[in-house]
Amino acid sequence: MPKAVRDARREESPAAKAQEPLRFPFGKNWARFLKDIDEGRIAQAESSLQAMLELQTLRGKKFLDAGSGSGLLSLAARRLGAEVLSFDYDPDSVSCALALRSRFDRDDGRWKIEQGSVLDSEYLSKLGTFDIVYSWGVLHHTGDMWKALDLICARVANDGLLFTSLYNDQGARSRIWRKVKRLYNRMPRGTRWALLMPAFVYLWLPPLAIDIVLGRGLKSLRQYHRNRGMSVWRNVVDWVGGYPFEFAKPEDVIEFCRSRGLVLRKLKTVMGGHGCNEFVFSRSAASWQNPNG
């Protein structure tokens, strides 16, 4: 087990987690994003899947969206031809996916939506395996990231793919952000702007300054929706409020998945900065032996 995994488990011990039952209401944040979803954002979400998976179509594929959030990427996978199963721990997120399906997808039974936890091994085992397992920006908010990653690795079928993203470990900076997120969730709702506005400036001043120097106006803001079809402000709220909060170095994630029969196929890092490193792993039937027989 990588040292980072052991350290994280010591730091996030059951006793510590019992003392801090804080959890950001991700589903309520996504519900506010639903009104911004249109055909353009759906197309961008489809393109993001095609680019990272290096597949133009998902026809004939079984797709698991573990922690589906708004449901946008589940919808994108469905539009690309996959048979989709979405689940989320947060009932508000489940409602978001249901609302999105009602608006944009004919209900032909090929997109199922459930409430479930990525930490519930019994629930996950009943789902079976999938050609594509997708979990973007989810596992590091569960309170036990490595257990969650272990459990979704087991959902990848032979010759299947795992597409996941996890917060980059920036050392001391990541630990400071964890304190900021914890504080945000403890603050009265009406005072949280006092953290959100400085965070917005911190996150967006550098790219906007570069845009201005290069004479591009506010290009970074205008084109942000091309990043998986997402919203600038909703993602800032998600970033500042997202708690529990864990993180990992790319090499630890790669080694962890390798030991579970998955081979790195594609890696997109934040180059040591804040945000999520993105990973696509594949499972070769020839290289995988089930440790449970």
Image (tube, rainbow, N blue to C red):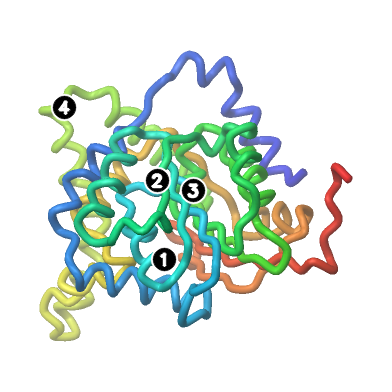
Give the residue pinned by disc 1.
77
Could you give the CA–CA distance between mark 4 and mark 3, rounded to whole angstroms?
28 Å
Count of numbered badges drawn on the protein: 4
Q: Looking at the image, is mark 1 or mark 2 earlier in the sequence?
A: 1
Please determine whether, in this image, residue 239 is positioned above or below residue 90: below
- The residue tagged 2 is 113
Q: Which residue is mark 3?
A: 66
Hey, what amino acid is under mark 2? Ile
Give the residue displayed 51% in from the left and 79% down from the top.
Answer: 55
Mark 4 or 3, nearer chain start = 3
Dot 2 alpha-carbon crowd within 10 angstroms: few under 14, some 14 to 19, many 20 or more: many
Between 117 and 176, the one lying in front of the other is 117
Closer to us: mark 3 or mark 1? 1
Q: Position of residue 10 (x, y in %)?
A: 65, 28
Disc marking residue 40: none
Count residues near mark 1 (Cα–Cα under 10 Å), then give few for <14, some for 14-19, many for 20+: many
In the rendered view, does 288 fall on the left or right side of 282?
A: right
Q: Is residue 177 left or right of residue 209?
A: right
